[in-house]
Amino acid sequence: MQGDLNIYKTILTKAHPGTFTHQTTEEFNAMINDMMLQTSKPMSAKAFYKILLKLIAKIHDGHTQAYTFGKLGSIINNQQRLPFQVYIKDERIYILKNLSQQKITEGSEILSIDNNLSNKIVFEILTYYSSDGESHNGMMHWLGGPYKSFNRIYPEIFNEKTTYDLVYRDYKTREITKTTIKSISKEVYSTRASKKYKSETSPQKAFMYRINTEENYAYMKISRFFKDSYEEEEDTYPIFYKQCFKEIHDKNIKNLIIDLRNNGGGKASNAAYLLQYFVDKPFTPAQEITTLGNDEYFSHLLGDTLDLDTSFGLKPKKDGTYRVTNHGLLRDLMTYSPIEDYSFNGKLIVLINGGTSSAAGIAAGLLQEYTDADLVGTETYGYAGISNGVRQISVKGKYTETAIYLPLLHAKYDVHEHIQKRSVVPDYHISHSIKDKIEKNDAIFEFALINLLKVTQKIPRQDTTIKTEH
């Protein structure tokens, strides 16, 4: 365990570009020393993995992960789960989907599990898992699933059990009830979920848009910043944007809502292409993209050739790091000119939440920096003005079945320096109540329509189609 901690210390210090963004060298070394002390006595493989999770969480970088493989990987992957999907708000945990065999009303609030109060549970998990920056909103959003779901992480952090003592407040009666629930396997969880919630299994489109000519607004939903793969044609998103803004221009639409909620990211260049329709001057999204070393440096460190010099056109800087000069591969460094033919000068609203990640966070940050957009929703998962999401590698331990996944490149975007290292904060903080979630009311979208666009028609539900003539 100590041998692998030394490996991870070296890699995080000499390869990761963001290890010291939110902590000093002294704080990092103190944590390593404490972990060395903890591992000076025997412990289970699962306990050591939890130590590694804490080490990675302190970096506060969503592109850096700890994971397991081999026998330990199988054990972690096949742990029993809680039979719930939850929604977390204001340090309170609500049952959004009940997959247990007990008649617990969906929407009920979990008050405690095995005498652990809900707020204690949330903050304990946040010491093992973090998002970009030091905001908690992104990680609390992701605990709602599916990637870092509460039902999987709770047994991992608080120890796997066959049964748990649950105290909850019923959504309808408001009565507080204590009961015992059984954990279930991931296969049982998946089977029950697919049978009970069939309508939610269809894959989400990368992008779509609709126009409501009666109320004079367009709605553009971008679920990710790549359509099919990172290798797709570079004009995929520019073509989509051109079609949208041409119709918006032709129909004289004066209001536009761009929905970046639950956008998991992708290529930041696809965010830059969007920004071209709102600016009146050329702009370069990324101020600089750097890495701590070149091929020779990483070959000595990792024992492997990464082909960074040629791929990214690395050039040395005075501080010993290297900057990327290959604009063709990383188009974030290119200069983008305004698209005047179908430029949009009307009212712009951008919807964000804790699922707005990676390049989507950058998109929200750039839109906030370059336009007069009103941002509505909750704080994003992704940074507003930096990213460590390019050219990632895995480093496995030599002595334990643990590993870390980390980026090698650091991008700094053209966003005010005092908000670059924080996720994007909305102008209007609007979140869903549990009633909204249960009844599928989109409170964020409704706020934008009613309060910012003054729309008078009946607001469509989250699961219905917006009235459109497109």
Image: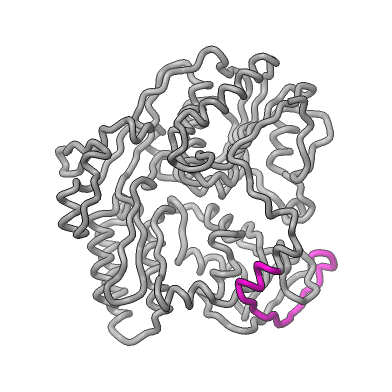
Where in the figure is residue 350, as x and y percent of width and height? 60, 34
In this orientation, which residue lies closer to the viewer: 320 or 4?
A: 4
Q: Quadrant of residue 281?
A: top left
Q: Is residue 7 magenta?
A: no
Q: Is residue 443 above or below residue 35?
A: above
Residue segment shown in magenta: 171-191
Where in the figure is residue 221, as x and y percent of width and height? 63, 36
User: Number of marks in the image?
Assistant: 0
Q: Residue at x 68, y 27 (%)?
A: 218
In this orientation, which residue lies closer to the viewer: 383 or 265?
A: 265
Where in the figure is residue 34, as x and y percent of width and height? 30, 74
Residue 242 visible somewhere in the drawing: yes
Q: Residue at x 48, y 74 (%)?
A: 76
Q: Residue at x 64, y 83 (%)?
A: 163
In this orientation, which residue lies closer to the viewer: 121 or 161?
A: 161
Q: Is residue 46 above or below residue 312?
A: below
Q: If the image is split into quadrants, where does the C terminus sit?
A: top right
Q: Is residue 157 above or below residue 336?
A: below
Specify whether 435 is left or right of 423: right
